[in-house]
């Protein structure tokens, strides 16, 4: 009886909860617990608690971590007003008698409330939700032959700040929605700030920036009800992309696994536009910029992404913060595809000014030119991550934009939007935006002016302030100059070149470069998204686009929608697939991966300590999952309980044992897999294992855990590792984690 089963399951969960699970104590195994009572003397604040127990800080990257501040609270002992006057009481307003009305005279109340009333600033019009981190970039010197920018020289170390983001959702939306991700980097170089404001996808929806408001209006929630939040699965988005077929390439990237990254740490980044660079000999080249993550490019499954949206909407933000806090520093190599600066700005038939096109890596290799490592979390989210202001026009000597009409429009938009968002023209004086070199501009006054400018002549030339500032003149090496590029003689037109009319060939190239399992995910994504549209005409129009990309893709989506598959209206391009676009088939380090260990506090715990050590040593993070919080065995503290753990958090799962209600634990060992009885395990453990199984994660078991695993019915498939000891199992789990998932499991299930 399914109803009874549901009721039983519910009761067991409730009993489990009532059975005394304490909130987990993340990151605090052993040691004396710090007192949380209100202190009466100043003392060091409680240490920050990352969600994971911290392994020793690793320095394999060679970047030290002393930038990480450990004091996170207010530092001075006495509370004051904003003008420094000490306060005796901030909890009671000034009243006419204990039960009387509050007096207007209460200047502290007014200051406190007024400031609070104005704490919020407008969120970004796009990319509102994000997470940031500080780091450093080290040049390899390999770009010298094409680019004279100082930060690319060998061994030059440049501080950076990175902000990752989603595009469509508002500030409070979930991290794991299907969307493009922003990947914006500010380099505080010795020649001034350079901002690389990129995305995790190498192409964009539109070829001309004048359509940006239109695509964003189409993607954002419907104006009448303001739904759906942070989604592309709705009519207006698909209306736009099926009418503006140049958007089809970017749309397929979004429908692919790239639209649901596993982690910000496991995303590629792309400058998207072609840039023009210049070397010491004043020769120019065109380049495409790439960030290549050291951990490889990995994604969530669609079901994981949806579950996380509810279970942990801060998943990516937390992942980045915790990884940095635990010393698993994320790292990317900056790479360049170097292309000749020909008058037609074409390469192998690809228009380099068209931001809906890539240059396949097989045609022009991505050459590493430097390494960025993120080593410190922001001290204050608002001050840094929220107030950071990127601008495509923050360029350093040796790097310039091209005439890509998307890049050109961006050059206007970024400063313009900061004027509203950050309340005036002085946002570059905000600490996170300040260059690390001296500035000597003649910009004056305006809202929020923090500088006290001396002198009387903020103009030039002048004879009053000693003639300063001077133009770089002879010191041209360090001055920015727009790189000489010929503009062909032309007539003013609102038009675009004919090469921009090819909207399908590279989409087909992307599709054909995917492995079968990735193609399957793409088909499901289109079927889901279009299935959420109401207008039949929009679905049919998008199916027509798919027909122009690939017949099988179109047929499978059409079947899912219950609609006929149309015939193509263009000739299908004969394209060479680019295997570099696929995420499957390579192996990567598993640093910072989370490995859950299900334990039975009454069972044999000897292997657990051994497995934990092995996991730490492999650079990963073990998380002990027990029926209740607190101490579960000697030297073993629960970090997750059956109530707080959910499969989506873990990259791999180990089962060391799982408590069974049966009085005799040996009954568990005797139980046969596939027995008719309902598994005699806590249903939350069954769910944990089943989800890990379904999401093609490696699952390991030893000792009592082996029998427990059998009871879940999730055995006898690829990626199930059994062994004698925890360490032995871990070694084989780690091998399989290198491929991110047990891809064969998808085929098997
Ligand atoms: Fe942006 N974009 N964008 N964009 N963009 C903004 O600037 C804009 C485009 C990107 O973490 C805004 O400060 C126009 C492409 C990132 O703070 C705004 C066009 C790419 C971020 C803006 C584009 C991007 C933004 C909103 C079409 C990838 C987040 C807030 C011409 C190469 C930066 C802000 C952060 C943010 C305008 C297209 C990346 C309104 C007009 C292509 C990563 O100025």
Image: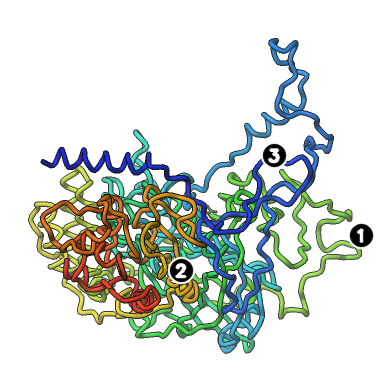
* Sequence order check, earlier mark of 2 and 3: 3
Q: Determine the residue positioned at 10% across, 57% down.
A: 559
Rendered view: 580 above or below 419: below
Tell me the distance, in whole angstroms, between the alpha carbons under discs 1 and 2: 74 Å
Residue 379 lies in what quarter of the image? Answer: bottom right
* Residue 250 vs residue 61, the one in the foreground: 61
* Sequence order check, earlier mark of 1 and 2: 1
What's the mark number on residue 549? none
* Sequence order check, earlier mark of 3 and 1: 3
Residue that numbered label 2 is attached to? 609
Rendered view: 230 above or below 367: above
SS for tag 1?
A: loop
What's the mark number on residue 464? 1
Residue 447 lies in what quarter of the image? Answer: top right
Position of residue 181 measured from the top left corner of the image (x, y, whole percent): 43, 60
SS for tag 3?
A: loop
Q: Determine the residue positioned at 60% across, 86% down.
A: 141
Q: Determine the residue positioned at 71% across, 54% down.
A: 429
SS for tag 2?
A: helix
Pair 2/3: label in front: 2
Q: State if disc 2 and disc 1 touch (CB < 8 Å).
A: no
Pair 1/2: label in front: 2
What's the mark number on residue 38? 3
Tell me the distance, in whole angstroms, between the alpha carbons under discs 3 and 1: 59 Å
Q: Does the residue labelled 1 lie within 8 Å of ligand 1?
A: no
Position of residue 188 measured from the top left corner of the image (x, y, whole percent): 66, 68
Position of residue 426 measured from the top left corner of the image (x, y, whole percent): 70, 50
Position of residue 482 measured from the top left corner of the image (x, y, whole percent): 61, 73
């Amino acid at each position: 009886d399914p109803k009874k089963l549901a009721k039983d399951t519910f009761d067991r969960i409730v009993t489990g909860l009532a059975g005394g699970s304490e909130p987990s104590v993340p990151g605090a195994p052993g040691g004396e617990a710090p007192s949380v009572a209100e202190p009466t003397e100043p003392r060091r604040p409680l240490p920050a608690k990352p969600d994971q127990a911290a392994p020793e800080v690793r320095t394999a990257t060679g970047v030290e971590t002393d930038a990480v501040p450990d004091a996170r609270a207010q530092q001075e002992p006495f509370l004051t007003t904003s003008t420094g006057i000490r306060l005796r009481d901030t909890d009671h307003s000034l009243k006419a008698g204990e039960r009387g009305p509050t007096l207007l005279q209460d200047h502290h109340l007014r200051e406190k409330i007024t400031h609070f009333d104005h704490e919020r600033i407008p969120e970004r019009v796009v990319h509102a939700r994000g997470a940031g981190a500080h780091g450093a970039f080290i040049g390899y010197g390999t770009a010298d032959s094409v680019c004279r920018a100082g930060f690319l020289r060998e061994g030059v170390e440049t501080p950076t700040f990175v902000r990752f983001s989603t595009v469509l959702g508002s500030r409070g939306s979930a991290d794991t929605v299907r969307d493009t991700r922003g990947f914006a980097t500010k380099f505080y170089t010795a020649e001034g700030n350079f901002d690389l404001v990129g995305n995790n996808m190498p192409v964009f929806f539109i070829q001309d920036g004048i359509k940006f408001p239109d695509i964003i209006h189409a993607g954002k929630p419907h104006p009448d009800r303001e739904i759906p939040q942070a989604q592309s699965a709705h009519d207006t988005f698909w209306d736009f992309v099926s009418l503006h077929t140049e958007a089809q390439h970017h749309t397929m990237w979004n429908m692919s696994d790239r639209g649901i990254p596993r982690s910000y740490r496991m995303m590629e980044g792309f400058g998207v536009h072609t840039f023009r660079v210049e070397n010491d000999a004043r020769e120019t080249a065109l380049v495409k910029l790439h960030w290549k993550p050291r951990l490889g490019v990995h994604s969530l499954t669609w079901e994981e992404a949806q579950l996380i949206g509810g279970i942990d909407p801060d998943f990516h933000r937390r992942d980045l913060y915790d990884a940095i806090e635990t010393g698993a520093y994320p790292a990317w190599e900056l790479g360049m595809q170097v292309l000749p600066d020909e008058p037609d700005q074409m390469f192998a038939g690809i228009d380099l000014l068209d931001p809906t096109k890539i240059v396949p890596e097989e045609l022009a290799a991505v050459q590493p030119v430097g390494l960025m490592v993120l080593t410190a979390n922001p001290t204050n989210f608002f001050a840094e991550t929220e107030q950071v202001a990127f601008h495509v026009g923050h360029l350093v000597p040796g790097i310039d934009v091209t005439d890509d009409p998307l890049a050109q429009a961006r050059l206007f938009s970024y400063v313009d939007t900061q004027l509203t968002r950050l309340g005036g023209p002085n946002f570059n004086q905000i600490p996170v935006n300040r260059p690390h070199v001296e500035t000597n501009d003649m910009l004056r006054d305006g809202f929020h002016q923090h500088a006290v400018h001396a002198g009387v002549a903020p103009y030039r030339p002048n004879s009053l302030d000693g003639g300063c500032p001077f133009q770089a003149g002879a010191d041209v090496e360090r001055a920015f100059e727009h790189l000489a590029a010929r503009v062909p003689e032309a007539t003013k037109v609102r038009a675009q070149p004919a090469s921009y009319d090819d909207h399908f060939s590279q989409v087909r190239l992307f599709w054909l470069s995917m492995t079968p399992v990735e193609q399957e995910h793409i088909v499901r994504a289109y079927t889901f998204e279009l299935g959420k549209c109401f207008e039949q005409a929009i679905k049919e129009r998008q199916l027509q686009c798919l027909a122009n990309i690939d017949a099988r893709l179109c047929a499978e989506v059409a079947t899912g929608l219950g609609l006929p598959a149309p015939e193509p209206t263009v000739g299908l391009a004969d394209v060479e697939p680019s295997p570099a676009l696929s995420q499957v088939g390579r192996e990567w380090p598993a640093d910072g991966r989370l490995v859950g260990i299900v334990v039975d506090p009454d069972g044999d715990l000897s292997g657990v300590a051994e497995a934990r050590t092995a996991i730490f040593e492999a650079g990963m993070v073990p998380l002990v999952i027990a029926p209740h919080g607190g101490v579960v065995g000697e030297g073993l503290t629960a970090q997750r309980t059956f109530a707080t753990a959910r499969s989506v958090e873990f990259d791999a799962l180990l089962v060391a044992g799982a408590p069974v209600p049966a009085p005799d634990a040996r009954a568990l060992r005797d139980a046969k897999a596939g027995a008719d009885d309902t598994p005699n395990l806590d249903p939350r453990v069954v769910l944990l294992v089943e989800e890990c199984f379904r999401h093609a994660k490696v699952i390991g078991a030893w000792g009592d855990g082996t029998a427990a695993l059998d009871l879940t019915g999730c055995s006898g498939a690829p990626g199930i590792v059994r062994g004698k000891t925890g360490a032995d199992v871990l070694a084989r789990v780690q091998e399989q984690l290198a491929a991110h998932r047990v891809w064969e499991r998808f085929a098997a299930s």
